[in-house]
Image: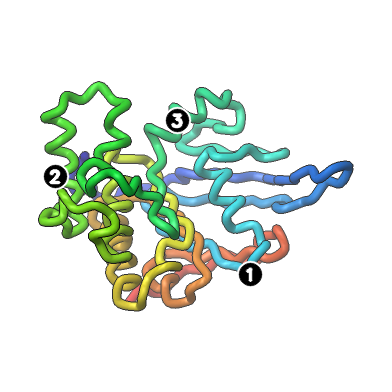
Amino acid sequence: MSSKRQRSSAVTSLVEIKNLTKCYTRGDQEIPVLMDITLDIPEGDFIALMGPSGSGKSTLLNLIAGIDKPTSGTLRVAGLDIAELSEAELADWRAQNVGFVFQFYNLMPVLTAFENVELPLMLTELSRSERRERVKIALSLVGLADRMTHYPNELSGGQQQRVAIARAIITDPTLIVADEPTGDLDKKSAEDVLGLLRQLNEEMGKTIIMVTHDPGAVKSARHVTHLEKGELIEKTKVERL
């Protein structure tokens, strides 16, 4: 895992989306979910995607993360058109470039916090000692150095989400994508998780894209983008406290 990174004075677009459309097919019917989306996300940004249920927020997040492919339009991440990759190539690209944080943590219940965080490294060529050192650093960063041997059911919701964040950053990804990361947390735990995401953005220069319904969560972002009925309504700058 890299050390603290300085934000470049010449900020470039890490994610470039142009005229992106996504439709799903149900029987003979084509259902549009996203329509003609054009959006640039600079490297080092922390953007919140907001909008009512069904507005296409999670679909857009999944497209950027390479989980799904657009129906038309272009989607480049770090200059690479990920829509042109095969499924196998996409899987490799995700493993190397994207860290995922989910609403319900998605931890393996039979694995300890340490083992859950180590999972993404099992596909790398790192030695056991190198993996161990990385995991210890990641869990320390999220404030859980003393919970390494605990299982998920021995941790609070906020602690489980911090384990998930440690897992998300363990491969030093280009992007961190978070889908409702505070949706299952109490107010204090949510504030702690948002503070951690903000710290990763400010101190490590991580680019974060977060789907949220919570207006309070937006205060941790740098920009907020509103979607409604599959269309991009506006992108505004957040005045951080």
Residue depicted at x 50% and y 42% = 65
Circle 2: residue type = Lys
Q: Is residue 15 left or right of residue 147?
A: right
What kind of element bears circle 1? loop
Is label 1 in contact with label 2 (beta carbons under 8 Å)? no
Residue depicted at x 49% and y 51% = 41
Q: Position of residue 100 (x, y in %)?
A: 41, 47
Q: Residue furthest right?
A: 28
Residue under label 3, please give it: 93
Q: Is residue 223 left or right of residue 63?
A: left
Residue under label 1, please give it: 52
Circle 1: residue type = Pro
Quadrant location, the N terminus: top left
Q: Position of residue 225 (x, y in %)?
A: 55, 63
What kind of element bears circle 2? helix
Going from the N terminus, do you reach mark 1 or mark 2 first? Answer: 1
Circle on res. 104: none
What's the CA distance linking mark 3 and mark 1? 30 Å
Q: For the residues carrying marks 2 and 3, which lies nearer the camera in this image?
A: 2
In depth, the one of 236 and 11 nearer the eye is 236
